[in-house]
Amino acid sequence: MNRTTLPSWLIQRSLPKGISLQVLDNDQHILFESTGKWLHPLLELERYVITHPLDTKTLFLHDRVTGRAAAALTVLLGFSCVKSKVLSKSAELLFTRYSVAYAFDEMVDRIDCMTEQLIDDSMTLETIRRMIENRITTKC
């Protein structure tokens, strides 16, 4: 577990009931939060960052469930510090590859989600992003 660069308050922190994702600064101020499901909170955050420029390298992302697709979006958003309640081993590999400090409450082999099953090791972050966009388009 790569906890060395994470503050203890983040490692010990729990998300409030009904909240699936929060972005916090070093003073623990909540800058963004979402109650969405699937990857929608990260996609909402992506849109938020466009209109509210944030230096994501200096902020903390706290997510409820992080699989490989969520990890890819997190890296693309520029976060370097992440806490997740549930983290998949494939998400851990991505965080390690891209030097993202992370902590988790529970490690699982895989997230039970079709999106995670569709991603393979040959896919780049951008390819994963495009696949997510295509899944959204075909679902709606």
Image: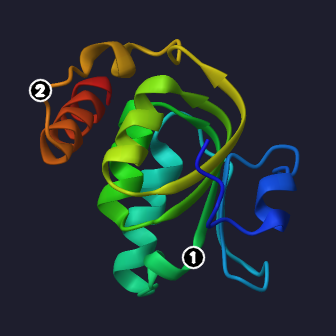
Looking at the picture, does residue 112 appear above or below residue 54? above
At horizontal 21% and vertical 20% (from top left) the residue drawn is 120
Could you say which quadrant of the image residue 37 lies in? top right
At horizontal 39% and vertical 84% (from top left) the residue drawn is 51
| Viewer-closest of 69 and 103 | 103
- In the picture, measured across the screen, residue 17 lies left or right of residue 90, that is right
The disc label shown at residue 122, or none: 2
Q: Which residue is mark 1?
A: 59
At horizontal 78% and vertical 86% (from top left) the residue drawn is 27
**Residue 123 image position (x, y, % from top left):** 14, 31
- In the picture, measured across the screen, residue 98 lies left or right of residue 120, that is right
- In the picture, measured across the screen, residue 43 lies left or right of residue 11, that is left
| Viewer-closest of 81 and 2 | 2
Q: What's the coloring here? A: rainbow
Looking at the picture, does residue 90 appear above or below residue 78? above
Report the amino acid beneath label 1: Leu
Report the amino acid beneath label 2: Ser
Dot 2, how many residues are within 10 Å of its Cα: few (below 14), some (14-19), or many (20+)? few
Q: Secondary structure at mark 1?
A: loop
**Residue 109 image position (x, y, % from top left):** 53, 14
**Residue 88 image position (x, y, % from top left):** 53, 26
Quarter of the image with the N terminus is top right
Dot 1, how many residues are within 10 Å of its Cα: few (below 14), some (14-19), or many (20+)? many
At horizontal 14% and vertical 40% (from top left) the residue drawn is 124
The disc label shown at residue 105, or none: none
CB-based contact (under 8 Å), mark 1 and mark 2 = no
**Residue 32 image position (x, y, % from top left):** 63, 71
Mark-to-mark CA distance, 1 and 2:
29 Å
| Viewer-closest of 54 and 80 | 80
